[in-house]
Amino acid sequence: MSVGRWLNRTLQVYRETITPDGAGGQVSTWVLQGEVRAKVDQPSAADRMLAQQAGSNHTHSVYLLASADVQRGDQLRAARQTFTVHAALQPSGPRYTRADCELTQRGT
């Protein structure tokens, strides 16, 4: 069974890249990795409570195809929203990937 029919949004995947600055330091930039189809939901109260107990702020669950290249620390962006990925998980039968995220709304 495919989850593709439920994925009703397109999000851009950004990954932080650190490169030397030539003066002994480093420069951090966010590099576009591609786009993924996704479904964005709010987590259950139990999921939010577990995240808070672990010191994380889990505001949204983002569901993706199992093959999506999304990792912890990535940003998923669309319009004026940025979802920071705190964890990317797959069930034991990998039909989808769930990314536990924190939403940051950007200005206009």
Image: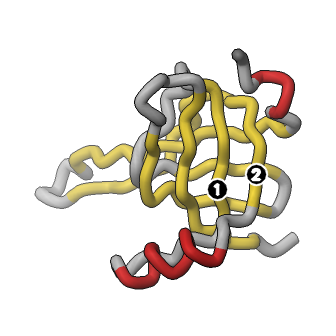
Q: Position of residue 12 (x, y in %)?
A: 68, 39
- Give the class, few, some or many, for how many residues have Cα within 10 Å of label 1's Cα (few <14, many ≥20): many
Compared to residue 87, the image places residue 98 above or below, namely above
Q: Does 29 sit left or right of 2 as displayed?
A: left
Residue at horizontal 51 percent and vertical 77 percent from the top: 57
Compared to residue 92, the image places residue 73 above or below, namely below
Query: For numbered disc 2, what is the local secondary structure?
Result: strand
Residue at horizontal 48 percent and vertical 49 percent from the top: 74
Residue at horizontal 50 percent and vertical 37 percent from the top: 70
Residue 61 disc label: 1
Q: Position of residue 35 (x, y in %)?
A: 68, 29
Residue type marked 1: Ser
Q: The N terminus appears in which quarter of the rendering? A: top right
Residue 40 disc label: 2
Q: Does 31 sit left or right of 25 as displayed?
A: right
Cα distance between the residues tagged 1 and 2: 6 Å
The answer to which image quadrant residue 17 occupies is: top left
Asked if the residue under mark 2 is in contact with the one under mark 1, i.e. CB atoms within 8 Å, the reply is yes
The answer to which image quadrant residue 14 occupies is: top right
In the image, 104 versus 51, the foreground residue is 51
